Structures are given as structure tokens and as C-alpha cells.
Amino acid sequence: MEAQLPILQILIPLLAAPICVVLRRRVPVLTFAIAVSWATFGVAVMLLQRVLAGGTLSYALGGWAPPWGIELRVDPLTGFVLMFVSLIGAVTLTYAPRSLEREIPDDRLHLFVAAFLLCLTGLLGIVVTGDMFNVFVFLEISALSSYVLIALGADRRALTAAFQYLVLGTIGATFILIGIGLLYMMTGTLNMQDMATRLPEVMGTRTVLAGLGFLSIGLFIKMALFPLHGWLPNAYTFAPSAVTAFLAATATKVSVYVTLRFTFTVSNVEMDFGASDLGTIMITLSLAGILVASTVAIFQRDVKRLLAYSSVAQIGYMVLGISFASVTGVTATIVHLFNHALTKGGLFLAMGCFAFVLGGVQLKHLRGVGKTMPFTTFAWVLGGLSLVGVPATAGFVSKVYLIRAALEAGVWPVAAMILLSSLLALVYVWRVVEVAYFQAPPEDAPRREAPLSMQLATWALIGAAIVFGLWTSASAGIAERAARVLLGVGA
Amino acid sequence: MNAELALWLAPLIPAVGALLVALLHRTPNLREAATLGTGVLTFADVVYLLRHASEAPQVELLEIFPGLTLAFATEPLGLLFALVASGLWIATSAYAIGYMRAHNEGSQTRFYVCFAIAISAALGIALARNLLTLFVFYEILTLSTYPLVTHHRTEKAKRSGRVYMGVLMSTSIGMFLLGLTWTWWRTGTLEFQPGGILDGVVSGREVIVLLALFAFGTGKAALMPFHRWLPAAMVAPTPVSALLHAVAVVKAGVFTVMKIVVYIFGIDFLAAEGASTWLAYVAGFTLIAASLVALTKDNLKARLAYSTISQLSYIVLGAALANAWGVIGGSMHILMHAFGKITLFFCAGAIYVAAHKTEISDMRGIGRTMPVTLLAFFVGSLSVIGLPPLGGSWSKWFLLLGTAEAGQPLLMAALMVSSLLNIAYLMPLVVRGFFAAPAGDGPFAVKEAPLFCLVPLSLTALGCVALFFHADWVYELLAPIVAP
């Protein structure tokens, strides 16, 4: 049983999806799906424990030994990402039933849940697999199901948002496929470990460079790195609340994970700060993204869209950490994957609470909400502070690692820009705070809180964002171990 | 009870008090009793700590970064600040009860809750064992005082709140955090150590840059040009201005600067590098400029705010002189100025409560109706000016010795000129209040503020006198900091 954990990680949600379609009725579908999502999280936790205790796990799918068969491979980084992706999946699915009441008709609910579980399967599959082509397959599973999830948003603009995402997402996926194809052509293998040993011989050939180029750009689109982020704001704004929270906390993060994997495990490009072209491109784009997207966020009237632009900026932080190619930098990226998933997930869940009670999340809907919905608003403020990077929040931990990485690399202007963007974050967070606390609520504003299940889920993530701002041996500790394994530096 | 437990409890008691206050929101009398009770307990706890300081208690709570923990410890400077903050909290709580009720202020529960959290944060700053812990509580203090500053929720409050948050957050996140990470990267630690941790690790221009990041990054120390938040904060109800913006918040700022100079840089290192001379001049400029601005303000609270900016720079100046006299004088000024300035704010609030006057030009003859208040104001003014027989004279004396020792006659002159300016902006109210004829027709009956206001302000005024005659214990407490 225990040896089968890596495959169970994807098998459980994958098989549960069609069962949901068969079950059809609201209550059994939801009960079953929530149980499955928590079971998936349980598997991820067990995997993480085992990998931290015993080192990297390798699972030969169907008994075919790698590099011929498909390999599932779990190292500390894999285990860490699996853990938080499945955690977010479970929390948002627990949150979803009440939140979806207003957004999705009952007769389509089972389809929604099935798509959700498929999306979760795809994301977990991308992370756990050790095979390049498999990454593409799971990427498509998660992408196709997420187009469906976004299109289910109550606003009709969700359809165009999903279509936009579909076009760009397909371009991204195609680029990734071309990239993988070119690399396969030159090395004759799809197994990541195997490719890593064969790639140095052919490194520098034009085909390999083209392959890496396609691969990188495809991933940049998928993770919404500025200026390839066009699909993200609309998708996040118009998707159902629970979907936004789930995708914002996991989908782009998984693309960052794949980038980490390809950069350091497979291609192992020498990426000293700015030494390679790819490094220079990543630094430039991430810094531009951090500053531009944060500035754009300040001017949004729709708070979901504001948070979406903030996500684009946060992706910039993660890519910046990768481009330092140092243990501290990569630690910053990995820990920020986790910290930002908690923070942004919690914030979007709070947005869902607002939408549920107030019927909209424009700034004008949020007037005086500090009085009418004090608990949710307070959760939002705490999450906002974590975005800014105030001490005792998770965002602070990531930021300190990132600044330290910049100082170690000897580029203090980059550190200054990171801090500048924190101040921009303070501005957009504070705009919402002022509206929520300083304006009088409209006469007919409902004076009640969102349902308990929604509030509990919101507070679970926001609370975690505070806990992991103070107690970091689990988050930053594991992240640093993962970074050392990834960079091949001794502990 | 042992000292370690007491160390735990110091920031914890007010935090629990905040919770208690929130729970008792339906019964105002019990709620206020909870505030006062918490204040007395906290103060008793700090006094206990002071008496058992020789045991050098330490506690560690959490490890935030590898090797960097959330930890508390006692040392003389921190104990002094903790004593000031918790002691004056009791007086302020009593005063606040009188003030808030006389004024029928709204949202009083939120007010007392945030107040208690702010005190908890101030004690966390005072007893922090390392820079990281200090920074965590520093930001909690900023956040918990924001609702107090914007208490009235008006457009003006909102705008002032923006300045308050904007300046304090952007300095601390933009500069302090950079300095902190930089120091961590260079030294691998952030623990406060006698003699500092930077000696031998950094040198030359890097020391100056780091010092600048810390000195300006501590926005609460209100060094120009980052002082605008303090006058903005004056929209808050007067008890907030009195305790937070004359004692807890601003003193947390200068305390932070002092602590960093003494325990992160080390005064010998700074003096040898000559890296802090520029800071002494910035402080010297601020203390003169702020005094001049104070002269132009007719609003009493605004004048007091600029006076505070000026007096804070005395303390930064003491730190920047980087010698024993400067450090002792600056640290002592934390205590002396606290008593003087809180008295002045209490009086300003009392005048507002009893006579509804905020502008100095309207306060002619106020001494006829409010003799006790104005007398207390007089005493507080003399202490802030630094005249004997009041506490403020000691700290200014030591600061003067410090400038002499550092060989900075210009700064010595700045201190003296500033004292003259203090007289010029504080005395007009006293003179006008006692000797000018009041507007309107007599006879004028004595009409003081409620006893809850009057007693605290009389006590703090008496404290200014007592501190002149019993300053020796402060000196003895502080002396070990600079002992070679």
C-alpha cells in the first residue's frame, strides 16, 4: 500500500471524477468529492513525510523500469508542492457548496465537481511525474478542465474569459509540446533524469536551444509571467469564487514548479545571475511584472481583478527567485509558492464571502463592509498585510528570503525594487481598507456574515498565512531542503 | 513566580486585557475596570522584572528564520522603556475614562482594545532580545494604533490615517526591513549584544548606509524629513496623543534607534568609524527646525506635536554622539520627556473637555477657570524646557556633556538654542492663561475637567518634580550600558 502512494496521489481524484458524474445528486456528490479531496491531501502528507525521512521516491508505472517506462518521482520539492496543492484543493472544495448555490444550477453541479477533481488530478500529475511527455498530458488535463470551470462563472463574460484563456493556454501548451519534442529529438529520451544526463552532449546545438526557448515561453504563458499574463485577470475575475481561489493558489504555482524542475533538474543551465540570456530575460520580465502589475492593481475598481493583477506581480517574485539560481533565491521561490498560495487563496475565499452576501465585489459593493461583515473583512485585511509583507505574516518570510538573495547576488537595486513593490501593494490593499472601514454602508446593505463553512475555510487559509509567518521550520525549512536537493548542494 | 514567567507575562497581560475588554463591551464600567486592572498588573509585572533583572531572564518563543527567534530578554534600556510605557498607561487609562465619557466618544470598546494591544506591542519592543522580534512588534504597534488615530472615521481622519500609515509603513518596509535583512546576511545574527555585532564585519561607507537605513527606517523616531505622520496623528482623541504620540509610539521609535546604535553597531565602533556624525547633525537640524515650526502653530496639540518631534531628536542626537554621556542623556530623556510631555497633552485635553478650546489664542485667562490644569501645564513646560527643579534638566545636562565630549560645539549650541525656543513656544500659553484678561464678562468660576482627568495630570506633573530629586536610580540603571 505504502509503496503505491505516488500513483494513488493521482488515481484517487482521477477515478472519483467519473463517479461524481454517475452519482448526480447534490448531497452525495458533494460529500463524496469533499471526502476524496481530503483523502488526496492525506496521501500528499504521507508522501511528504516519507520523502523527508527517507529521501527521493521513485515509482515505476506499470512495472516498467525507467527510463523506458513512465516514472513518478517524489523529492522534497515534489512532496511540498503536492502537499499544498492538495490542501488548497480540499479547502476550496469544502468551501464550494454554499458558495456555488448562487453561481451554478443544481443540475450542473455534478459536472462542476467532476471538472474540479480532474483539474486537481492534472495539477498533481504535473508535479508528481518524472516524465516530460507526461507533464504535457497532465498539463492539458488541468487546462481543459479549468477552461470548463471558468466558463461556469455566473457572469456571461466568463465565457469570453474562458475562451481567451483557452486560446492563450493552447498556444502555451503547444509551445511546451514543441519544446519537449525538440528535446526528445536530440536526446531520444523523455525521462527527466535520463535526459539530464544526455543533454550536456548536445547542449548548445540550435535544436536544443530552440527547444528550451519554446519550452520557456510556453511555461511563461502558463504561469502568466508579465507580459504574457493577458489571460489571467479576466479568468480570475469572472470565474466562480471557489474556482478563482483554487486556480489562483495552485495553477500558476504548478507552472512555476515545472520551470524550477526543467531549469535545475533537466537542463541544468548555468544560470548565475544574469550570466545566461535566459537568466537576463527572466530578471527583466519579473522585475517589470512586479512593478507594472502592482501599479495596475492600484487602479482597479473590481477587487477580484485587483487581486488578479497582484497575482501577476507575485509570479514575478517567484521567477525572480529562480533567476538568482542560488540556494537562498530558490528557497525564496519555493517558500513563496506556498505562502502565496495560502495568502491569495484566503483572500479570494474572502472575496467569495463578500460576493455571496453583497452580490458583487466592486469597490462600491464593499462600502462599509467593515461594519456589516467584520470577521470576513478582518480576514481580508490580514491577508492583505501578508501581501504587503508585514512581519508576522507569511508574505514577510518570502520577502526576507528574496531580499537576502538579492543582497547575496550583490544587486541591491533589485532589493530596492522588491521593497518598492511592497509599498505599491500597501497602496492597493489600503484602498480597499479605506472603502471598507471609512465609508458608510448603504441603507439596504445586508448585515450578516457569510455561511459558516465559507468563513471557516477562509479563516483556515488566512490563519495559516499568519501561523507560517511565525513558525517557519515547516515551510521555509522544507523549502530550503528542497532547494538544496534541486541545486545539488549538500545540506 | 520567577523572572522568566514575568518576562513572558509582560507583553501577554495587556494582550489578554485587550481580549477581556472586548468581551466586556456591554458593561462599560466593568470594561474600564478591566483596562485599569490590566494596567496595574502590567506595571507590577514590569517592576518585578526590574527587581529581578540581575537574574537576566530570557525566553524564546518561535524560530522564524534559521537561527532567528522570537525571543525576549531584559536589559537596562528596555526595562526603562517598559517601565515608562506601562506606568504611564495606568495614568492614561484613568484619564481616558474621564475624557472619553465627558466627550461621549463612540466605539469606546474598540478604543480600549486597540490601546491595550498597542501597549502589548510597546512592551514587546522594549523586551525584544533581537532585532527581528523588535521589528515584529514595531509593525504591530503601527497597525494597532491606526484605528486609534482614525478613531473619528471622518474624511480628515482618513486623510491623516493615510499619512500615518504611509510614512510609518513605507519607512519601515522600505528601509528598516532592508537594513535588517542586510545585517542578517552580513552577520548571520540579529541578537542585541553589548558592543554590537557589526564591528569587524562591515566598514566604511557600508556602515553609514546601514545606519541611515535604520535611522530613517525607524519612522517613529520622526527624524526630518519623515516626521509628517506625527502632526497628522493629532486628529486622534487626546488620550491617544498623550500616551501613544508622546510616549509609547514615538519613544518606541527613538528607543529602537538607541538600541540599534548601542547593541547592533556599538558606540565604540561607531565612534571609531565616525559614521554617525552626520546623523547627529540631522538630529540637530530636526530639533531646531521642529521648534521653529512649533512657534508658528496656534493649535495647541499641533504645537505640542512639533515640540515632540524636536524632543525626539534630542534622543537620536544622544545616540548619534556615540559616547557614554550621549547615550545616558538620550536614554534618560526617554523617561523625562515622557513625563513632561504627557502632562502637557493631558492639560490640552482637559482644556478641550472643560472649555472646548483648541487654539492657544483663545485660551486667554484660562488660568482663572482652570488653575490646577494650567499649573500642571507650567510644571510640564519647565521640565520639557529643561529647567531645575524638574526632571528634564538632568537629561539635557547629560546631553550637553555628550556634545562637549564629542567635540561638537555647534550641536551644543543647537541644544541651547532649542531650549530657548522651547521657552518661546510653551510659555505664551502659561503667561496668557494666568495674566491676560479672559474674553467675555466675569465673574469666572473655577471649572476644571472631571476628576478622572485632573488627578492623572496632577500626578504626572508631580512626577516631573520627583524625577529631579530622584534621578539617581535612573542613572544607576543605565550606567551598565556604557560601562566598558
Image: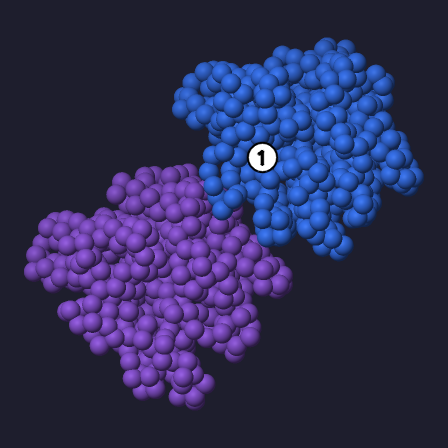
Chain colours: A purple, B blue
Residue located 35% across and 57% down the image: A76
Name the chain letter of the residue that bears numbered label 1: B
Task: Give the image location of residue A103, x and y in percent.
Answer: 24, 56
Q: In the displayed structure, does residue A480 sit left or right of residue B455?
A: left
Residue located 61% across and 64% down the image: A411
Q: Nearer the viewer, residue A14 or B54?
A: B54
Residue located 48% across and 18% down the image: B34
Which residue does the numbered mark 1 point to in the structure image? B129
Q: Nearer the viewer, residue A311 or A193?
A: A193
Task: Give the image location of residue A224, x and y in percent.
Answer: 41, 69
Task: Give the image location of residue B26, x and y in percent.
Answer: 41, 21
Element type at mark 1: loop
Position above or below: A212 against A160: below
Which quadrant holds residue B133? top right
Position above or below: A113 against B302: below
Residue located 44% across and 56% down the image: A491
Task: Give the image location of residue B359, x and y in percent.
Answer: 74, 30
Q: Amino acid at mark 1?
A: Arg
Label 1 environment density (alpha carbons within 10 Å; few <14, some 14–19, many ≥20): many
Which quadrant holds residue B323? top right
Residue A225 seen in the current view:
yes
Q: In the displayed structure, does residue B52 sit left or right of residue A216?
A: right
Q: In the displayed structure, does residue A398 sit left or right of residue A41?
A: right
Which residue of the protein is positioned furthest toward the left in this rendering? A22
Which residue of the protein is positioned furthest toward the bottom in this rendering? A206
Q: Please identify the quadrant where the C terminus of chain B is shown.
A: top right
